[in-house]
Image (cartoon, grey):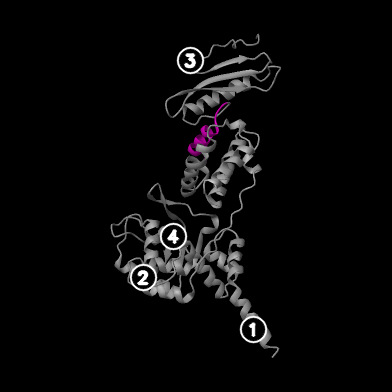
Amino acid sequence: MAAGLTSNRRRSKGEGSLTRDKDGRWRGRYWITLDDGTKKRQCIMGNDRDGKDREEVLKRMRAEKAMADKGTPVLHGKNTTGDYLAYWLKFIAPVKLRPTTLQTYSWIVLKHLIPRAGKIPLTQLKPSHVRIMLIQMQKSGYGGRIIQMTRNVLSAALRDAQEEGLVHRNVARMVAPPQYASTERKHWTKEQVLRFLEIAKTHKYYIIFLLLLCYGLRRGEVLGLRRKDIDFENNVIKIRQSLNLVNYKATIGKLKTKASKRDLPMTFFIKEALIAYFETSPAYPDDLAFHASTGNPIYPNVIAKIFKKLAVKAGLPPISLHEARHTTATLLAQAWASPKEAQAILGHSSITTTLQIYTHTNYEKKEQALNALTSSFM
């Protein structure tokens, strides 16, 4: 077939066109309809200048046209970084990310990435673009953590773009992330925990705070507990799911990591408190252990607000629920639990996380050991 002419076989309307360029390569073209109703022309190029890949180009064009008809278009050519990020959020990220993570990533994409880099053609995005974007964010007063997260989200999106063959390199990875020094986690002492529980004893959510502080559960884990997860016969509490706030709705989802799935021994003290709670609390069809007075699931942010109010009432320095989890880890270290035991209780995916807490909280143990050693010399 002469260069630049269409192929002999006549394709049906909407199937696309197939032509051969002057350099010998086959070119497939077809139209897709975007979410806003506008039409966009897509182009697929062959790599064989001898024209031997005609059927391969035709096959790819038909497959991509079918995907586009189902609402999952493959991006090509002159698409901008913003086009790709919108595509990534809709079709790729939801499959790979937890709902709460997806919610955070979506906010970063829409708030920071698309406004700052969205108009740059995806294939022309350079490390310098990323570097300038991060510097501009820093000059605008954003903290190191949010700047670091913006770079990391872009890197995750470009990694998937690389896997799909849309870009040849991940330019975000070529830019060093900004230095971020996390603030030191606060925690309560054992006496402060007892003070808080004494004040919280009359509150309807006392049992929830008891589980949070005694087991170091994440708030989504305790609110996602079902009655069937609490085995009174074998004295076991099974952590199997999480309740999180997604788009302002309480949503049951998977646990944070594989290590989060764990069985915890039910102590006599906790068992007594759970039995007392269930004796006065009705069961609901969703089988969740804890409910609001309306019978609906308890929102995680509600628990956080009540926790803060009770801490103030108890005259304690305010800490977050995540720092309450840190408090449990600290008390485990002071109780001489091994790092591996603490890791299993807390559901840390890496022993490194547990060891960081242990390294920070072992000052008293060091002091005791040195006092014992020096006193032996006297």
Disc sitting over residue 313 in the figure: 2
For the residues marked 2 and 1, what is the alpha-carbon distance in whole angstroms?
38 Å
Q: Earlier in the sequence, mark 2 or mark 4?
A: 4
Disc sitting over residue 371 in the figure: 1
Would you say the residues marked 1 and 3 are in contact, meaning their CB atoms lie under 8 Å apart? no
Q: Earlier in the sequence, mark 2 or mark 1?
A: 2
Residue at the farthest left position:
294
Q: Nearer the viewer, residue 82 or 267?
A: 82
| Residue located at (68% from left, 17% from top) | 51
Dot in front, 4 or 1:
1
Q: What element carries label 4?
A: helix
Quarter of the picture containing the N terminus is top right
| Residue 216 pos. (x, y %) | 48, 65
Question: Would residue 15 be counted in the magenta stretch?
Answer: no
For the residues marked 3 and 2, what is the alpha-carbon distance in whole angstroms?
72 Å
| Residue located at (37% from left, 58% from top) | 302
Mark 4: amino acid: Arg
Q: Magenta residues?
A: 78-92
Q: What element carries label 2?
A: helix
Disc sitting over residue 341 in the figure: none
Residue position for label 3: 13
Mark 3: amino acid: Lys
Neighbor class of circle 4 (other Cα within 10 Å; few <14, some 14-19, many 20+) is many
Q: What element carries label 1?
A: helix
Dot in front, 1 or 3:
1
For the residues marked 4 and 3, what is the alpha-carbon distance in whole angstroms?
55 Å
Mark 1: amino acid: Asn
- Looking at the image, residue 39 lies above or below residue 196: above
Question: Would residue 81 be counted in the magenta stretch?
Answer: yes
Residue 170 shows in this picture? no
